[in-house]
Image: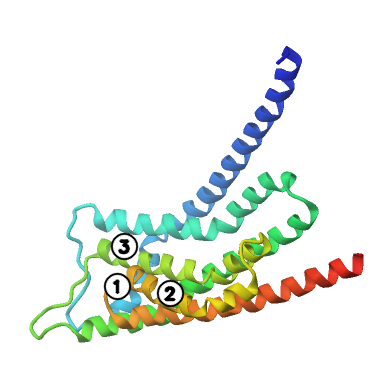
């Protein structure tokens, strides 16, 4: 390889690395700009998160901190997670700006709707877990406590438990987007997805049993919406395929 060819190869790589650094820095700045004001309200955020549990605790019970730094670190950790969730659209937008130059025009038209819908569905999944699943599951747990056992949850363990549920429901609600992407890439067809409904139904219940606490109630609350969203994904992919075929016929 001549010196000129090497220089021509090196320049695009260097430009890509500079662009990547710019997008990463801007994504991190967006995250910290959201995080800084949230740190002042970390205690209120944790109180809001703990409300579904606090409402169900017996009179005289409260949450406890078994580690010295837990009262400080736990709300701080929650503030960081909330900041990331709120900054997620900005972070995804930076990723989009980095990969957009390498995409075809028709792919660019699809990416932004996909990013918007996936972010919205993730938020919907988290809201579903907070407003419906947590009160139902905690009510079951508290009512199942043996007589004479005081229910006093550790603050850090509670946060880990809730975040695990949020992640499970947030990603489960991404099912339609994942299905549409698989169909668009030609990995599967809507007909193949419809033919494997039985396997998917069993699979979502197995996944729900792994991702949720060891009780049937939370497993059902995750598996049923996930399967319904699978059906929504099939309908959406069929609609997209029909539109693509109609467009190809018109252009021909």
The residue depicted at 49 percent of the width and 79 percent of the height is 227
Q: In this figure, which residue is indicated by the disc labeled 2?
A: 204
Q: Is residue 36 above or below residue 157?
A: above
Tell me the SS state at disc 3: helix
Please state if 93 lies on the left or on the right of 60 as rendered: right
Q: Residue furthest left?
A: 148
Cβ atoms at labels 2 and 3 below 8 Å apart? no
The residue depicted at 60 percent of the width and 58 percent of the height is 89
Q: Dot 1 surroundings within 10 Å: few (below 14), some, or many (20 or more)? A: some
Tell me the SS state at disc 2: helix
Q: In this figure, which residue is indicated by the disc labeled 1?
A: 213
Among numbered discs 1 and 2, the one appearing first in the sequence: 2
Q: In this figure, which residue is indicated by the disc labeled 3?
A: 160
Cβ atoms at labels 1 and 2 below 8 Å apart? no
Residue depth check, mark 1 versus mark 2: number of the one nearer the observer: 2
Among numbered discs 1 and 3, the one appearing first in the sequence: 3
Residue depth check, mark 1 versus mark 3: number of the one nearer the observer: 1
């Amino acid at each position: 390889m001549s010196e000129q060819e090497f220089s021509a190869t090196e320049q695009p790589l260097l430009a890509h690395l500079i662009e990547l650094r710019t997008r990463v820095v801007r994504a991190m700045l967006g995250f910290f700009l959201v995080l800084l004001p949230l740190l002042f309200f970390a205690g209120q955020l944790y109180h809001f998160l703990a409300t579904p549990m606090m409402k169900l605790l017996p009179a005289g019970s409260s949450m406890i901190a078994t580690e010295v730094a837990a009262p400080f670190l736990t709300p701080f950790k929650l503030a960081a997670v909330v900041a990331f969730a709120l900054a997620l659209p900005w972070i995804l937008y930076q990723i989009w700006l980095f990969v957009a130059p390498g995409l075809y025009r028709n792919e660019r038209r699809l990416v932004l709707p996909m990013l918007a819908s996936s972010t919205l569905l993730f938020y919907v999944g988290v809201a579903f877990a907070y407003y419906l699943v947590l009160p139902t599951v905690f009510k079951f747990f508290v009512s199942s406590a043996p007589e004479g056992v005081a229910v006093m949850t550790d603050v850090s363990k509670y946060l880990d438990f809730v975040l695990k549920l949020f992640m499970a429901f947030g990603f489960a609600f991404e099912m339609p987007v994942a299905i549409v992407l698989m169909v668009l890439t030609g990995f599967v067809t809507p007909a193949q997805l419809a033919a494997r409904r039985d396997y998917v139904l069993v699979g979502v219940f197995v996944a729900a049993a792994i991702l949720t606490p060891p009780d049937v109630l939370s497993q059902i609350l995750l598996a049923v919406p996930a399967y319904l969203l699978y059906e929504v994904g099939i309908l959406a992919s069929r609609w997209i395929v029909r539109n693509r075929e109609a467009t190809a016929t018109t252009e021909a």
